[in-house]
Image (cartoon, rainbow, N blue to C red):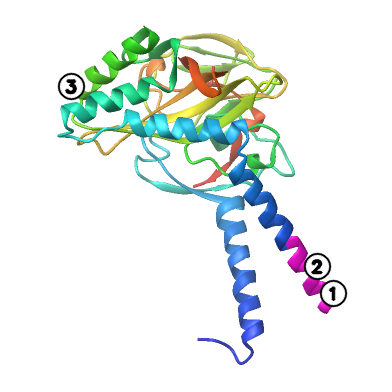
Amino acid sequence: MFGRNLKWTLLRLVIWSVLCVVVFKLLFIHIRVDGISMLPTCADKSTYWVSRLAYLWHEPQRGDIVAIRFVTPDNSISRLEPPHIVLLKRIIGLPGETISFVNGRALINGVILDEPYETLDCNWNCAPVTLGPDQYYVVGDNRSMPPEDHTHGKCERNQIVGKARL
Amino acid sequence: MKMLLRLLLLAALIAAGVWLWTIIFPGPEKIIRKRLAQAASEASFKSGENPLTSAARAETLAGFFSTNVELNINLPEHGPHNLTGRDEIIQAAAGARSLAGSLKVELPDMNITVGPDKLSAVADVVVQVQTAGNKDFYVQEMKFTFQKIGGDWLITRVETVRTLS
């Protein structure tokens, strides 16, 4: 069980423990989907990894599936702590854009957004929403449900925890 | 090597001292976190709870709120509900016990902002509720406003928050 040198074995144990905590607690979060708002892309009860490194070097992109925290974190060190519950949504609107839904189609600045992942029937009509400089518009892929039953809308950049790896 | 060990020991002692200090003299944020966790625990109940215990726990739950507390709850599937004062909280707690077989309330994530006067605070909280026989749970973002009244941090206002709005 132990190597020849107990000191080195213990040191290796500490390093591996720290590495595991950093990787599986801070850098990647394992999530389980609970609900149907991301169907058909993400099935209910399916599990995914969320990378918190994804947006270190570039900002979130349209079409990314992201984990969003409910409670906006403060600027203390506690913001590094991953949330226990997140929303899994797709980014369709980027900062400064105006998003609306007309007859089930998402419009970005008045132009229809091509969404090949949208395969379910949708008849949403939602008034235009203009995003602030740090805001993104997120929505689930399952828009066959009424818009009032589907959590969607603006989220702040610091609410985005990371990118889901499907 | 000896010097390094001494330094490490000193660092460990300082860390232990700081930790002990926070245990003996917790800050407002820690106190509020603890009170919210206690309130969630008192709001939870199991099936077959003794009526006397239920009544006592409802009273205990009401004790976390100020006498003039206001609750504005607006849930998508249930519409708006407004409660005022501790008596209405006790009634609501009793009503919940008669409607649901069991209830488990947890607060997995929260962010607490203490006011500059250190006499008021706002807690943004994720409330997770699970009812009897239901594997799925209901999640709602809520805002709790606290005030330090008579040395105790009491909830003066509770409101639901519409996530992503």
- Which amino acid type is marked by label 3? Ser
Q: Is residue B44 visible?
A: yes
Secondary structure, mark 2, is: helix
Q: Is residue B6 magenta?
A: yes
- Where does residue A94 sit, x and y in percent of width and height? 65, 25
| Residue at point 70%, 19% (across, down) | B117
The answer to whether residue B90 is above or below residue B128 is above
Q: For residue B7, which numbered disc appears in the image? A: 2
Which range of residues does the magenta coloring cover?
B1-11
Q: Residue furthest front?
A: B150
Q: Foreground: B30 or A40? A: B30
Q: Residues within 10 Å of mark 1 (few under 14, many from 20)?
A: few
| Residue at point 58%, 67% (across, down) | A17
Indicate the chain on which mark 3 is placed: B
- Where does residue A79 sit, x and y in percent of width and height? 64, 39
- Which amino acid type is marked by label 2? Leu
Indicate the chain on which mark 1 is placed: B
Q: Foreground: B113 or B66? A: B66
Is tag 1's residue or tag 3's residue first in the polypeptide sequence? 1
Q: Nearer the viewer, mark 1 or mark 3?
A: 1
Quarter occupied by residue B99:
top left
Q: Residue furthest right?
A: B3
| Residue at point 58%, 42% (across, down) | A163
Residue at image mark 3: B98
- Where does residue B74 sit, x and y in percent of width and height? 40, 12
- Where does residue B17 sit, x and y in percent of width and height? 69, 53
Residue at image mark 1: B3
| Residue at point 58%, 59% (across, down) | A21
**Lateral position of residue B21 relative to residue B85, left or right:** right
Q: Is residue B1 visible?
A: no
Q: Foreground: B70 or A165? A: B70
